[in-house]
Image (cartoon, rainbow, N blue to C red):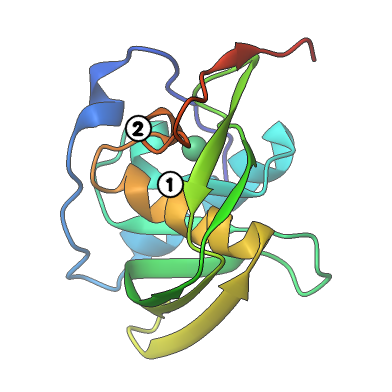
Amino acid sequence: MAIRKIRVDDDPILRKKSRPVEAFDERLFELLDDMKDTLARADGIGLAAPQIGVLRRVVVIDMGEGQGPVELINPEILETKGEQVADEACLSLPHKAGKTLRPMAVKVRAQNRNGNWVLYEGSDLKARCFCHEIDHLDGKLYTDSLAPGEHVYQVDD
Ligand code: NI
C-alpha cells in the first residue's frame, strides 16, 4: 500500500487513452490498493489510474456511503438518462471547477478484482462521478464537458 503522486494540469498522460485490464493478478490488486490510499489521502470521491500515471482502465470511487470505495475495472456506460448541469472539479486540476453537462442517471458495468462483471446505477452526483472517472480512461477531462456558456473558474481551497 502506498500513496502515489497525482498527475496534474497539463501532464500529457492525462490526455492518453488507457488500455483494458486483462490480468486480474497481484499487480492489479496493488494498483487498486494504492489508488484507494491515494484517493483517501487526497480526500476525493474518485480516482482513475491515468491520474497516477498508469494507463489502464481502472477507477476507484468513494462516495462516502460507508461501504468503502468501489473498484471499477474496464468500466463501460451502458445507458444514460436525462441531463444535469452542476459543478465539477478534479484532483488533477487543482484549485479549479466548472459546471458540466452530464446525464442525470447512468447504468454502468465494470469488472471487480476477481474479474466478475457487476452492474451499477447512479444518479445526480454519482452519475457525474461515473462519467467523470470513465472519461479519464479516454484522456478526457471535465473541462471537455462544460455546459454551454460555462467556463472553468478558480477556487480557493
Ligand atoms: Ni478527475
Along the line of sight, which residue is nearer the eye, 126 or 112?
A: 126
Which quarter of the image is occupied by the C terminus?
top right
Q: Quadrant of residue 12?
A: top left
Q: Is residue 21 above or below residue 3?
A: below
Element on which disc 2 rests:
helix
Residue 144, numbered circle: 2
Q: Which picture quadrant has residue 16?
A: top left
Q: Position of residue 71 (x, y in %)?
A: 51, 67
Residue nearest the viewer, comparing 70 with 134: 134
Residue 49, image x, y percentages: 38, 45
Q: In this rendered view, identify the residue nearer to me: 140 or 53.
A: 140
How packed is label 2: few (under 14 Cα within 10 Å), some, or many (20 or more)? few
Ranked by sequence position, the earlier of labels 1 and 2 is 1
Q: Label 1: how many residues lie within 10 Å, few (<14), some (14-19) or many (20+)?
A: many
Q: Amino acid at mark 1?
A: Ala
- Would residue 31 be visible to someone looking at this image? no
Circle on res. 48: 1
Q: In the drawing, does residue 138 fall left or right of residue 81?
A: left
Residue type, numbered disc 2: Asp
Label 1 CB, ligand 1: below 8 Å?
A: yes
